Image: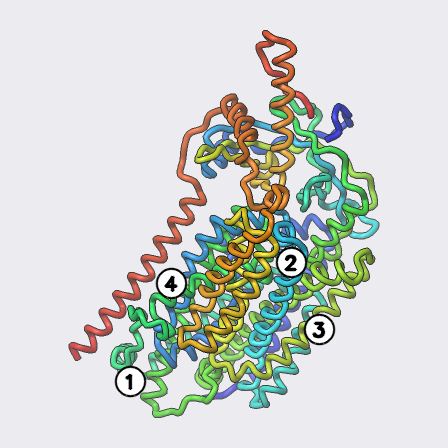
Amino acid sequence: MNGGRMVECLTLARRIDVTAAQKRLQRLGAHACEPAWVRLWATGLGVADGKPGAWLLSAHEMRRALLLVGAELPAQIEKPRAGVKIDSGAPPTPKALNRLWLWERIATPRHWRIQLLDSMPVPIWLPCWLGYARGRHLRLTILSGLSGETLPMLKPIVLKGLQQAYQSGQASATTSAGASERSEKTI
Amino acid sequence: MEGFTLFDTVVLIGYISLIAWIGSRFGKDQHNPEDYFLGGRKIPGWAIGLSVMATQASAITFIGAPGWGFEGGLERLVTFINVPLAMIVLILVLVPIFHRAGIYSIYELLERRFGPATRTFTALLFLIARGLATGVVLYAPALVLAVVTGWSVNLTIIIMAVLAISYTVMGGISAVIWTDVVQMFVLWLGALLSIFFLVTSLPGGWGDVFDFGAASGMFNAIDLSFDPSVTYSLWAGLFGGFFLHVAYFGTDQSQIQRVLSSPSVLDAQRSLLIGGYLLIPQMLLFLFIGVILAAYYQQHGLTPPDDLNELLPRYVVNAFPSGMAGLVIAGVFAAAMSSLDSALNSLSAVTVRDFYSRYIKPNASDAHYLKASRLATIFWGLYATLFAFFAGNLGPVIEAVNQIGSWFYGALLGTFLLAIFSHRANARGAMAGLIVGMCAVWAVSALLDISWLYNNTVGVAVSMSVGYLVSLTAPAPSQEQLSDVMMTEAAPDMQAVLAARADNAQVIGKEARLTRRRCIGLFVWFCLMLGTLALLQGWANEWWANG
């Protein structure tokens, strides 16, 4: 987490609306849902000296990266509005990113020709949906707001973010008694 | 009886060239990464599932299962009756943990949980076991080539090894899922045509098959004997075969690789579901061919070949119309190549990731690792070739593959279950459990007369119990070591956070969980299959009793 450091991010357009997200989360047993945004780092993938054809979305704490297919990042002009915003912190080092992609390529030999393009990682806000499922424990399901796929690899980052949001919410409730609304903030 | 004609040879070469062309056209020459990645996503789930099945077992099923059926009828189906139950465990327990852990090789999970020695040892076990089993997979198409050409099987093993290694080193063609699907249909078509030609060649048609099958007890798929020495009793299938398949699909990197690469847990589950539903009917089909072949051999007074793996390829070559035999044999070749390609790839990936890059050259360039992975492919190809020379002595190839796995995988599965279910287990216990578990399997199979299907059960039980007890002699693992196997949101402070958020989130209606529905579906399928076999057995015995 990089505290209050705010970097200008691209905001990816949310493609899965609330109805579609609820339908998917319902099938996964969730009883409540809310929108969220997770800040990750996008690095272009392509053939050598070519333009990006896909993007590797990563964060310092992620063990495996996410893959976003498309030449352009599907950005929207508006900044993220509704929903908790979770910052994953500083980008992985170029060396770590290269090594991450190397293992992806070795695990899937048909990806061998695709290389990590030599460019700075771009910070992006990835739209997500958080689903809460009751059981013996409350469980969290993270759904991509782009594809509707579940993203279990984001769980450590999201849980850490929610915990910090909760703690800072509690702290502000203690210091400014009487505040009726808990403000969502980037953490 | 036409034999393998020139036209068959033309069809064989044409089919393989076509598959190779499709592979190189759509698999390797895509310079746009968007096409590369989207290619896989536009393909429907059922095609991906069939592709998984084609990679898993099609060639050795085609060759091995009819030999099984010829020898023992449907009794060996109990080996596979447990597959839906095994898939339930995989879907519920192993896949979510593996997927969430974000690992490339499943042995990494054991390193995080138990330390580097456990990872290295389990990865080594995988390399030895899968390398040996790949030898059997290599033997299958070599045998077909030997039947078709009349050459010695040792020569055809070398030819197939050279082809398979070069093909894998060059990148393989398995990138194209549709070619796997086509191969699957070609093999099933071959199986259905074999049944048609076989049955129509019998004077009494199906009546002869059922008379012969019922008279010789070949439809007795369910043996309720509690005697552990009965190899294919229902209990051996349920309590032994179940662990065999959980271990095979859950702890063998070559099988779980696709699951780890799936974009989501639900996608990963889908590919397992297809196997859960289709493996039993597929085995039933090929075992049934073995029964019909037995009736055919008896009616025509023929002597079966010494190696029962040759039964179906020999029949296809001799009885199928010219051209059709070439197509089916080509399907076996292409399917075997697809299996060999993924096995050699996973062996080389584990060699480079779990050994070479850790112990020999930790910070080499991409090009260096690519070279190392190609050399590893060649090494494992040679290792498999050496073992393939002995594979013919192991009986039906399908049983050989499973038996080899059963020497190692029970203890391996026990170690994974210990890692997941016991939060007290530690590195010392895991290593002790693993070693003692394997020794127990070898001791039991050497000293006791019990079904080999129980090998995995023994391995799981011994490795878990020894592992747990030995763990008590060393300190408990840290919370960090448990992070991959514990539900991270279960901590009390995290529950408070989630409860606060859930209370403020939008409420949605309740519906049965997809995973639960999928598991119930698999369980119903298991009951249905078991019931069908019981009905078939009862009906066949009634038929025979009534003359």
**Dot 1 amino acid type:** Pro
**Dot 4 amino acid type:** Leu
Q: Are marks 2 and 3 in contact (CB under 8 Å)?
A: no
Report, in whole angstroms, how far the alpha carbon at label 4 lies from the one at label 3. 37 Å
Q: Quadrant of residue B138?
A: bottom right
**Residue at mark 2 shares a chain with residue at mark 3:** yes
Report, in whole angstroms, how far the alpha carbon at label 1 lies from the one at label 2. 60 Å
Q: Secondary structure at mark 4?
A: helix
Q: Are marks 1 and 3 in contact (CB under 8 Å)?
A: no
The mark closer to the camera, 4 or 3, is 4
* Disc nearer the start of the sequence (4/1): 1
Q: Quadrant of the C terminus of chain B?
A: bottom left
**Dot 2 amino acid type:** Arg
**Dot 3 amino acid type:** Phe
* Disc nearer the start of the sequence (2/3): 2
Crowd around label 1: few <14 · some 14–19 · many ≥20 (10 Å): few
Crowd around label 2: few <14 · some 14–19 · many ≥20 (10 Å): many
Instruction: Name the residue that disc number 1 marks.
Output: B203
Placement of A12 over or under B17, stated as above or below: above
* Disc nearer the start of the sequence (2/4): 2
Instruction: Name the residue that disc number 2 marks.
Output: B119
Instruction: Name the residue that disc number 4 marks.
Output: B238
Percent x, y for residue A174?
62, 13
Instruction: Name the residue that disc number 3 marks.
Output: B379
Report, in whole angstroms, how far the alpha carbon at label 2 lies from the one at label 4. 30 Å
Q: Are marks 2 and 4 in contact (CB under 8 Å)?
A: no
| In the image: residue A156, left or right of residue B197 | right
Between B351 and B461, the residue placed more toward the observer is: B461
